[in-house]
Image (tube, rainbow, N blue to C red):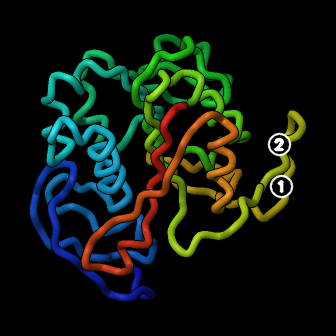
Amino acid sequence: METDFEADSYFGLCSICGHFQEFKRSARSIRETYRCAQCKALLREREQAQSILACYDSLRASTLSDLVEKTEFRHLHIYEPGTIGPFRRLFKGLPHYQQSDYYPEEQRSQAPLEVPHQSLEELGFADASFDLVITSDILEHVRKPERAFAEIARVLKPGGYHVFTVPLQEPLPAKTIARVDTSGDTDKPLLPEYYHGNGKGGRSLVYTDFGADIMDMLSSAGFVSHLRRPSTASAIVNRAITIVSKRV
């Protein structure tokens, strides 16, 4: 059990399930702890949910569980790459919700795939297909993230939102650092290889350590963006960051 972190907690409402409780820190990474006792959502997931609620504040929903019952939200076209996490449990019943996964090339010809294959660098959707795209700690694992930002902008309708997380928290590093040279067809490590768990028992290579200049990348892709931080009684929690980008 990890012990090399400052103990911390705060009281609040889970933005996903609505359970009021004391959220307690149980790990060094602040984004990956303060778990909800009821729905098990982590801090970064709850803050992402809070950001989605803010995007659709006119619908007057206090939690994501409430939001999915709103007729206007149920009509939205939503895309979320990945197969794990609390949003999928709530959104899977929505009529225009789509998921995808990324498979190694040798698996893509296998049929049927449980979840369709998509690459964020080359999405197979028409322009302006979606009102909302959600990515959760995925873009640091994409070989060419700027290409992914451009593709997400392409498939969003004007005025649509990309609400996402990458491993960022205050204090922000100024510059993004590429960990791998992807200028050719073959990856060439620039820094020691670093992996995150992929939630499926495997691990995924980290290609990029993002910094504050991620905002410039998003602007170049066609977004107006802002960093959203928690507003709680915990100064530690308030260092977490969610990024909300609106398609111009």
Precedes in sequence: disc 2 or disc 1: 2
Q: Is residue 56 left or right of residue 11?
A: right
Task: Name the secondary structure under disc 2.
Answer: loop
Q: Is residue 140 left or right of residue 30?
A: right
Is residue 39 in sight in this rendering? yes
Residue at image location 36% in from the left, 50% down from the top: 48
Q: Is residue 25 left or right of residue 123?
A: left
Residue flagged by tag 1: what amino acid is it? Pro
Q: Position of residue 168 (x, y in %)?
A: 54, 63
Above or below residue 75? Residue 62 is below
Q: Position of residue 60 (x, y in %)?
A: 15, 41
Residue 220 in which image quadrant: top right
Above or below residue 157? Residue 176 is below
Quadrant location, the N terminus: bottom left
Is residue 103 in sight in this rendering? no
- Report the residue marked by disc 1: 189
Residue at image location 31% in from the left, 35% down from the top: 88
Residue flagged by tag 2: what amino acid is it? Thr
Residue 27 in which image quadrant: bottom left
- Report the residue marked by disc 2: 182
Q: Nearer the viewer, residue 79 or 38?
A: 79
Checking the image for residue 154, the label placed there is: none
Residue at image location 19% in from the left, 32% down from the top: 68
Q: Is residue 246 left or right of residue 69?
A: right
